[in-house]
Amino acid sequence: MSKENNKIYFSNSPFTNGHKVIDFVWNARLDQNFDLWMDLHLESDNYDQEEEYKDDLDEIDDISQENAEKQLWINYDHAIISSTYWNNKGIKIENETQLDFNLLNKKIFEIDPLPMNLDEPESLAFGVSMLGNDSIAQHEITFLDTEEFGVFDIKWKGKIANTYLGETDFDYDFYVYMKNIKFGGVKVDPSLKKEDVVEFFKSKLTHFEDFELVETDELELENYILKLKRQEE
């Protein structure tokens, strides 16, 4: 089976063709302590969207193991893997050069290696909904540069334990290859003063001149986002 781009695949899934990724966001945030964190958010299409699945008498009467497994997955609708949806930690940027786009190419982030303490889900970088609210660890996230500034291909794989249904072993593998993902910017904690934020980014961010500090609207949780400037044609 060849894997297509912009789809997510799960091992041990009855849907071997994977699922389209309908939402993928890559950004960062600056917290109240001036620590930088990287966030990823992924959401798949409905599990049965690309299947010729029909809710008719033939399907209802089909009691095969494959159909039963498909019914189980369909019951949980779709997948979410995210550091923001459940307010997980995300990826700590220990060195600001990790947000230097010149150095990010082929950079691999290895996050939450196994074994993992399942009694402290809040300590995990990401949350997941696969078959209910499960647990996710041993991430390997690779960034591959494209010809456009601030745009990368992102390869992401890791392991999932179906803890919602009582399992503790990380028996499920997932794999994603997203093409042409643009960096969404750095969200700024609303407690920070604008002038302090500007000075911080001037001293820490290699590409500061390629960004602009943009005020957000009243519906946002932050007052400012450091966004990439529009590139001239």
Image (cartoon, rainbow, N blue to C red):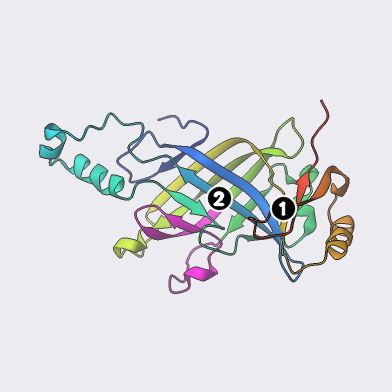
The C terminus sits in image quarter:
top right
Badge 1 or badge 2: first in the primary sequence: 2
Q: Secondary structure at mark 1?
A: loop
In the image, what residue type sits under mark 1?
Thr
Q: Residue furthest bottom?
A: 119
**Image position of 70 (left or right of 56):** right
Q: Secondary structure at mark 2?
A: strand
Few, some or many residues within 10 Å of mark 1 (<14, 14–19, 20+): few
Residue 134 forms part of the magenta stretch: yes
Please name the residue shown 79% across and 54% down the image.
Answer: 97
In the depicted structure, whether residue 1 falls above or below residue 185: above
Please name the residue shown 48% across and 73% down the image.
Answer: 120
**Image position of 193 (left or right of 85):** right
Residue 163 forms part of the magenta stretch: no
Depth check, front residue: 211 or 15: 211
* Residue 179 % position (x, y): 60, 34
* Residue 28 % position (x, y): 68, 54
Q: Nearer the viewer, mark 1 or mark 2?
A: 1
The N terminus sits in image quarter:
top left
In the image, what residue type sits under mark 2?
His
Badge number at residue 216? 1
Q: Which residue is mark 2?
A: 41
Q: Residues in magenta? A: 112-139
